[in-house]
Image (cartoon, rainbow, N blue to C red):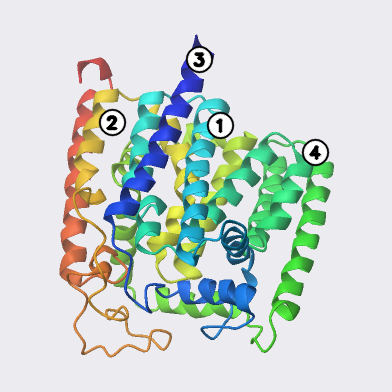
Amino acid sequence: MSFLIQKYFIILWTIISGFVFIFYGYIQPITIINDGVGWDGTQYTTMFNYFKSGTFTFDLIFPFNQRPFVPYIAYLISDVFNLDMLMSFRIINLSFNVLNVYLILYIFVKIFNFNKINISFVIFWFIFHYLGSFRILNNYPYLTDSVSLSISLLLFISLIFNKYKTFFIIAIFGVGVKEQVLPIILILLISIFLKSKIVKKDLNKKQFIFLIITMFFCFLINYYIKHYGFSNIEIGSSIKTILSWGYVHLSNPLDFVRYLVAIFLTFGSFILIYFINFSYKDFIINIKEDSYMYSFSLAFLFFIFAFLAASDMERVLWQAFPFFCIFFLSSMEKLNKFYIAFGFLLSIPIMRLVSLIPEASQALPLIRKSDLYMINDKTPGDTVGLYSWLAEYMEIGQVASWGIYMIFIYLILNKIYNLTKNDSSSL
């Protein structure tokens, strides 16, 4: 019976996710910026057009020239099924979004066996949140977010079950989707080494050497794509990119308020409940297990990426969502379900369920002033468009409003938790 419940639980949510993506495909308008391809989309569509006709429609730049595999798959779909570029990318987005839901459910149910009510709250958030790829990829379809998340999840599952051949194949393919595969393998190497020190056991040399070999081959593929994949492209430097964005994000201390709000808008009450209920002892016990160590490593990596390696930090932070939720769900196991449901209900306004993603009312984010953005600080911010939904760019008054709401939810949940922690059944 338990097996049947697990099986149909996963299938049900997976099917629902497919219909949700199709639904938003019908009601969500596509951005009109750059003739409907957006910003990063100029790079992915120009690679698509290069594969199709041998010509670039936009100037191809670093780091996007390292990511040809998704545009190439879209080109193959277009060529084989005689579809246009938009439909080809939408098929990829639909397929990998549904796959992501299945993989996340597989991890939560089959590997960790978390409570299914709690899982349902998390999956609902993942599918319907405006930062999630179910909504954002229908507004901005020319991205690789869904595919790159699939790569991370598949690498995680493969390593958990010691499926080294599978891990190697996924990594080799994934490095051509997004270069983040290289730091993913590196952080996993570090986590394996640290775990051996924490549990005071010998290092798993077979696993460690395998990851080094895999990273070496991925490096070779990445090097070849960067230097020989497309001609007349400036090679660029990932380290320089990290240092540049890191300087932008860390140079203004007041921006840390934005970052706290960005984290809250991404994770909602889940992260507040986690810290209210945080147990250092439980954390140490969990981190000694491979599954928790790997998930913590990947969550930490994407957290660093979000704040040091890119703009649109909420979108990058979203790549860490499944791995953070492993810890959220673990801490929620011992909590009253009505308490969790109440916290979830308080977070629903964050999701903007009744609103469609708006068009940006400015051509570029006009809040931040830096050499990278080249923004005139006298220009008012985007108060009603897309950037008014992102804490990194929204006006300070909107940041303050969400910050106050975050504190409000925290105080309520913390008060209830303290009143009932000795008798959760009384909630």
The residue labelled by disc 2 is 340
Nearer the observer, 381 or 282? 381
Q: Which mark is residue 4?
A: 3
Quarter holding residue 148: bottom right
Q: Residues within 10 Å of mark 4 (few under 14, many from 20)?
A: few
| Gap in angstroms between the C-alphas marked 3 and 4 | 39 Å
| Gap in angstroms between the C-alphas marked 1 and 4 | 19 Å
Q: Give the SS element for disc 3.
A: helix
Q: Give the SS element for disc 1.
A: helix
Which percent across, then down, holds residue 90?
A: 46, 56
Q: Residues within 10 Å of mark 3 (few under 14, many from 20)?
A: few
Q: Are marks 1 and 4 in contact (CB under 8 Å)?
A: no
Nearest-to-viewer mark from 3 and 4 = 3
Q: Are marks 3 and 4 in contact (CB under 8 Å)?
A: no
Residue flagged by tag 1: what amino acid is it?
Ile
The residue labelled by disc 1 is 285
Q: Give the SS element for disc 4.
A: loop
Nearest-to-viewer mark from 3 and 2 = 3
Residue flagged by tag 2: what amino acid is it?
Ile
Q: Residues within 10 Å of mark 2 (few under 14, many from 20)?
A: some
285 lies left or right of 210:
left
The residue labelled by disc 4 is 202
The residue shown at (44%, 40%) is 325
In the displayed structure, 426 sits above or below 413; it is above
- Dot 2 or dot 4: first in sequence order is 4
- Dot 3 or dot 1: first in sequence order is 3
In the displayed structure, 240 sits above or below 353; it is below
Residue flagged by tag 3: what amino acid is it?
Leu
